[in-house]
Amino acid sequence: MENNKLSRKNFLKGVGALMGATATAGVAGKAEAAPQPVRTDEKGLTVRKRKYKYPWWVKTVDKITTQVNPAIEERPGLHYSAYYGNMMHHDEWKLETDKAKAHVKEGLVNNIPGRTLPDVALHYATHAYMTYGSLGSFDAPRSVGTKAHDELLSYNMHPPQDFDLPAWQTTPEEASRTVEAAGIQLGASMVGFTQLNPQWLYTWTHRDPKATEMKMVPGKGMVIPEKDVYVIAMISQGPRDLLIRNQSELGAAGDRAAYSRIFSAAVGMVRFIRGLGYSANQMNGTGAVIPHSISAGLGELGRMNRMINPIFGGNVRIECILTDLPLAPDKPIDFGLQEFCRHCKKCATECPAGALSLADDPYWVPANGFQAPGKKTYFENNDACASYFGERGNYCSTCMSVCPWSKQDFAALHEMTKVFAAKTPRAGTLFTELDDAFGYGLIKPESEEAAEWWDLDIPELGIDSYQGKR
Amino acid sequence: MMTLFLGMALGAVSIWLYGQVKALGTINWLGRVLYLSGIVSLAFGIETFTGSMIEHEMQAGWMGLGAFGFTTAILFIIGWRFGVSEKTE
């Protein structure tokens, strides 16, 4: 019996052992955090070690998971991908704006939940920094290419050249680590790097060896410096509480909030890179950002024809920066999405415009003249998509919001479900059914529940900035 | 912090309940495995509930608590039936 008693000596021994173990773990952790040696891939190209580490079920791969055929690949025209480009070519443009006015007024007059005056005002408020964005905003003040935008980028800006000093000198790996940290601080949820693929530039964009900055040249189109061959891809997650109220002004507010944040971060990033003494320009309006972001390891192309990120799902908005700062690229990723999307189809089923394809397999032939061939995907009827939200005067992103990958991660169940989905993507149908049974997806538009957003206790900017990092 | 307190409370209740059952009968290996599995399932249900409430996903929270709570109940019933034998004096 005496032996079972805990003596003072044994107690102190135990405490000593525990402290020793803690110290060893601390030293091991510090060693792990030390700078990593330069890594190269099988071709000898430098590959960066991503600071943000994906979970184990996200694999890195050498090629993007979407099949492409360079033999039939065409450069996209602006109207191929920009909905408003589509709308501007639309004969019924005027009619649709009249319809939009009537639709918005109907919500205001009848106090329809999700379409009341505060809802509409929030939509307009979150739209503010869209104006920092791109030619996608066309006539918006401070759009790329306008004098006001140039002033925004140059205001109180003093690159090292102003002090007769050279631009920042470092290795591509260190540059990537630094730019990633700056991107997150500036408001991006995730940052990746790749090299420019000229095939993914719009037809009206020209690379000029003499150009020093991006410029709109009348009669010629957009001119970009030829030396800008590195791409910084950034994504921002959208405020989910707003986005699940899609097909309303509140949903539009969520969409605009996500875009505003990424465009604001992009303006900051351009200033950061220029502050280091290098060239930097926003890519939106000059080239397709989705394939570059996929190439930079930020996601895979989903059935909805938008990029799906393994952590934030479809609830992301993208902007890329073109620069001549040498950066170490990321590798593309594969988390089983291609197979998952074949079976799931939730985005296509829920699309209010019926614009997304329900085909079992992806195909090479574009659905209409607004799309560029060369990739095997589920080409959508983007005319129907644009007409739907054009007639309503707000922005729909139902497909991105209902995607089963668009979950927060406070409940461990979501993380576990993603592991199963990534490892058994053929069970996509089952996951969709479970998703419906658990009540995920959109809150019924125009219901009282939609209006409850105003009573929710939401985090800053409506997002959880620790998502994927817990 | 709330998760910590919930975990501590669940742990305390689990130990107390185990003691109560042990006083009534002998628990074999199957009973212990099923009891532990039931507690893990219940913990998972509670975690799903609290996490979903933070996410404002009410239906998912109640569904998760119900599904994993039901699983716990089933495991406890099977464990009681096949894993516990009454003490004989």
Image: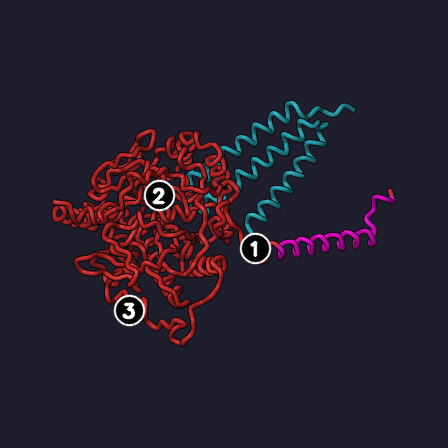
Chain colours: A red, B cyan
Q: Which of marks 1 and 3 is nearer the N terminus?
A: 1
Query: In terms of depth relative to the viewer, which is nearer, A357 or A272?
Result: A272
Segment colored magenta: A2-31
- Tell me, yes or no, whether dots 1 and 2 are on the same chain: yes
Residue B85 as seen in the image, left or right of residue A12: left
Proximity of marks 1 and 2: CB atoms separated by less than 8 Å? no
Label 2 chain ID:
A
Query: Residue at 87% of width from left, 45% of height from top?
Result: A2
Marks 1 and 3 sit apart, C-alpha to C-alpha, by: 39 Å
Considering only order in the chain, which callout, 2 or 3, is on the residue closer to the N terminus?
3
Say which quarter of the image contains residue A450: top left
What residue is pinned by disc 1? A36
Q: Can residue A308 be seen in this view?
A: yes
* Magenta stretch prevailing secondary structure: helix
Q: Mark 3 lies on which chain?
A: A
Residue A395 to residue A214: above or below: above
Dot 2: what SS? helix
Tell us which disc is closer to us: 1 or 3: 1
- For label 2, the residue is A401
- State the residue in front, A194 or A301: A194
Mark 3 on the same chain as mark 2: yes
Secondary structure category for the residue under label 1: loop
The one nearer the camera, A444 or A341, is: A341
